[in-house]
Amino acid sequence: MKAFSRLLPCLLVAAAFVGCAPKQDPNTIRMITEATFPPYEFREGTAVVGIDVDICQAIADKLGKKLAVEDVEFDSVLPSLIAGKAELAAAGITVNEDRKKTVDFSDPYVTTGIVIISAKDSPVKGKEDAQGKAIGVQNGTTSADYCVNELGQEPDRFDSPAAAFAALKAGKVSLVIADVDPAKNIIVQDGGDASAFAITSEPYFLTSEDYAIAIAKGQPELLATINEVIGELKASGRLDEIFAANKAKSDALATAE
Ligand code: GLN
């Protein structure tokens, strides 16, 4: 008991320290992402790299800060941003009205869309073919929203586009709906033209979507800086280089695996 009463103050001090969240380093800006989305974010060894990382690095450079990257599941990206765990969310995030209610978006840095991946010999071409079939999607994405809102059905939800594709290969779903660039990377990884699967949607894009950087609401200065950087990257041609380099790198990694 005596020993415990001597220990107690130490325990209380230790508990106080644990309770204290580490102070955010003012010299670092934190980006939150989800690294299963090549070429926007993917792993090269242990490092998270990709188009979004390069854009956020340019933002960090402009602010004179270091960039720290955190990788979480996609449906946690915006909640984590709102909870103050990062200053920037960049994860191939599509701008939409629902999300605009909770976060602010930068100017878009690309216009893209979602597509269908299915077996070449049983191609699902359009919305009508997809309806009523088992559809694999990444959880929390606009592809999941598309199933619910446009097709009127619940999709099978996975942690990544690649996991949804694995379910397609295993015959557990009939098609996958995903953003076009990770979809293309999946086909490259599966053998490219030799793959039994392909992007089969006609028209090619089911939607048109803009990607942008998200930040917590009410920070007009940070938003202006981010937009300035995106504008500069576009005007200088650097953004095109970032896209080309990361597509090449993620395709090379996909064929090396
Ligand atoms: N663009 C899609 C969305 O915002 C998917 C993004 C992702 O999976 N990283 O919902």
Image: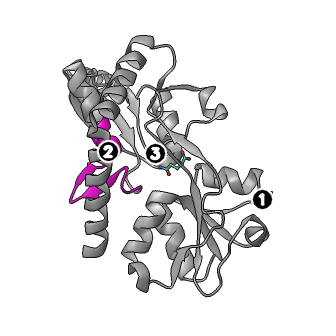
Q: Is residue 44 magenta?
A: yes
Query: Which quarter of the rendered picture does the N terminus lie within?
Result: top left
In depth, the one of 119 and 234 nearer the eye is 234
Residue 128 in view here? yes
Callout 2 amino acid: Asp
Callout 1 amino acid: Leu
Residue ID at (48%, 23%): 216
Callout 3 amino acid: Gly
- Report which quarter residue 209 is drawn in: top right
The residue indicated by pointer 3 is 92
Residue ID at (56%, 36%): 95
Q: CA distance from mark 2 to mark 1?
A: 34 Å
Q: Secondary structure at mark 2?
A: helix
Q: Is residue 254 above or below residue 56?
A: below
N-term-proximal mark, 2 vs 3: 3
Horizontal side, residue 20 vs residue 74: left or right? left
The residue indicated by pointer 1 is 151
- x then y, percent, for residue 154: 73, 60
Q: Is residue 204 above or below residue 16?
A: below
The magenta span reads: 37-55
Q: Is residue 95 magenta?
A: no
**Snapshot colouring:** one colour
Q: Is mark 3 within 8 Å of ligand 1?
A: yes
Q: Secondary structure at mark 1?
A: loop
